[in-house]
Image (tube, rainbow, N blue to C red):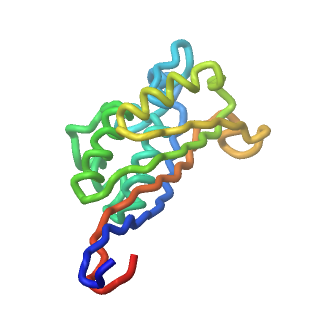
Amino acid sequence: MAASENVAMILPRTGIGVDVHAYAPENDPQPLWLGGLFWEGERGLSGHSDGDCVAHAAADALFSACGIGDLGTHFGTDRPEFAGASGVKLLGEAARIVRAAGFEIGNVAVQFVANRPKFGPRREESQRVLSAAAGASVSVTATTSDGLGFTGRGEGISAVATALVYAVAAAPPGDAA
């Protein structure tokens, strides 16, 4: 290969996102949206939007990987148009923002910590919904905290996500591939 040829280089970047929401007060019940799904009969989470901490952590991980702010930067309480917005909508918008910044999404992995709902039977459904919103693979796992901490006491749900994004850049002239 001639030294003057430009070769595309894939530049991977990773990010981490964390989101936590308390359960809504019993005197102000909310529906539970988690992993992009409605969970009938389950106590919902408090939040500026729908409180879907799985979708929110995924969006935050994407922003982190790109170095372009966080969930609050793009959808915070100072943005009333996002009040009550679905986590799926926010994840889709986050993916659009990430791509507009020049990145492609490799994948997102999310794990949430909660005593309920029982997630396993709806895992595939959740992954399909979130992957469609992100336009990339999103995997979701769940665990409990063996009765420890606020999640163990049933006070709320937490989620942690990692994301892989990449940019394609031309190698500087003269660099070998």
* Residue 147 point in image, percent of width and height: 77, 38
* Residue 54 point in image, percent of width and height: 50, 38
* Residue 12 point in image, percent of width and height: 43, 63
Is 122 located above or below residue 55 in the figure?
above
Q: Is residue 38 left or right of residue 160?
A: left
Can see residue 46?
yes
Q: Quadrant of the C terminus?
A: bottom left
Residue at image point 27% right, 52% down: 99
Residue at image point 38% right, 34% down: 87
Q: Is residue 5 left or right of residue 33?
A: left
Q: Name the image quarter holding residue 84.
A: top left
Outermost residue, right direction? Answer: 146
Q: In the rendered picture of this protein, how many numbered marks are placed on residues?
A: 0
Q: Is residue 106 left or right of residue 93?
A: right
Q: Name the image quarter holding residue 1.
A: bottom left
Q: Nearer the viewer, residue 165 or 89?
A: 165
Q: Is residue 163 left or right of residue 140?
A: left
Residue at image point 40% right, 53% down: 62
Outermost residue, top direction? Answer: 41
Q: Nearer the viewer, residue 156 or 143?
A: 143
* Residue 172 point in image, percent of width and height: 28, 81
Is 38 located above or below residue 81 in the figure?
above
